[in-house]
Image (tube, rainbow, N blue to C red):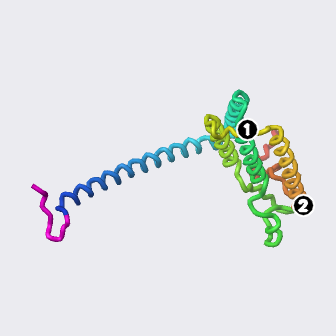
Amino acid sequence: MESATTASGIPPATTTTDDNLQSSESSSSADAVNRLIHAVTQRQQHLLDKTVPHVLYRWIACLCVVLIYFIRVYFVEGFYIITYAIGIYLLNLIIAFLSPQEDPEASLTTGGTLPTRRSDEYRPFVRRLPEFKFWLSIIRAFTIGFMMTFFEVFDVPVFWPILLFYWVMLFFLTMRKQIQHMIKYRYVPFSFGKKQYGKKPAPTESSE
């Protein structure tokens, strides 16, 4: 016996109920996945925040990651195009790390934030790319590159000395331009000689 339908040809309400149950189950599973991703992201951010004050240990860990990547590339004797791409990315990171947050040419017309005279008030150098983000970007770049070395599709045959020569020349030209920019606008990408504003120790009274 065929299932009953309404006069307008619409199936009974049981079909609509089943659809609602399926949609609610899919939405609940999606919410569970979103909660899991959010929890993992929060945990990762918490661990990264704990490493902020440990500058030396962070850079030692970064050096270990870089060494592991180069050891991997040395033994597989390939994936030089990935290494070249990482090198170009690192060059951009270095330029952003050495550049001020505000353009000195624009700041000269608006008053500026970089001191240009000895009598100017001390202002610490504010980078376009902070040190922590610089470190984190290097870690991520070499980690992603290391994982890509396990896929043969990224092993493009190339004569690596040409890539190395081109990268060295690009590094030399870029750094020369950056140094000329520093000399022109008279800034140093490091904060040296910061004045201490702590209280002076009270003078001791001489014993009679």
The tag on residue 19 is none
Q: Quadrant of residue 71?
A: top right
Residue name at image x 67 percent, y 34 percent: 65
Q: Is residue 11 above or below residue 75?
A: below
Residue lying farthest left?
A: 1
The tag on residue 157 is 1
The tag on residue 184 is 2
**Residue 194 on image: x %, y %:** 80, 51
Dot 1, how many residues are within 10 Å of its Cα: few (below 14), some (14-19), or many (20+)? few
Residue 7 in the magenta stretch? The answer is: yes
Q: Secondary structure at mark 1?
A: loop
Residue type, mark 1 in image: Pro
The residue range painted magenta reads 1-10
Q: Sequence-wise, which precedes: disc 2 or disc 1? A: 1
Closer to the camera, 8 or 60?
Answer: 8
Dot 2, how many residues are within 10 Å of its Cα: few (below 14), some (14-19), or many (20+)? few
Residue type, mark 2 in image: Lys
Asked whether disc 2 touches disc 1, contact meaning CB atoms under 8 Å apart, the reply is no
**Residue 185 on image: x %, y %:** 87, 61
Residue 173 in the magenta stretch? The answer is: no
Question: Main SS of the magenta segment?
Answer: loop
Closer to the camera, 124 or 3?
Answer: 3
Q: Secondary structure at mark 2?
A: helix
23 with respect to 99 (left or right):
left
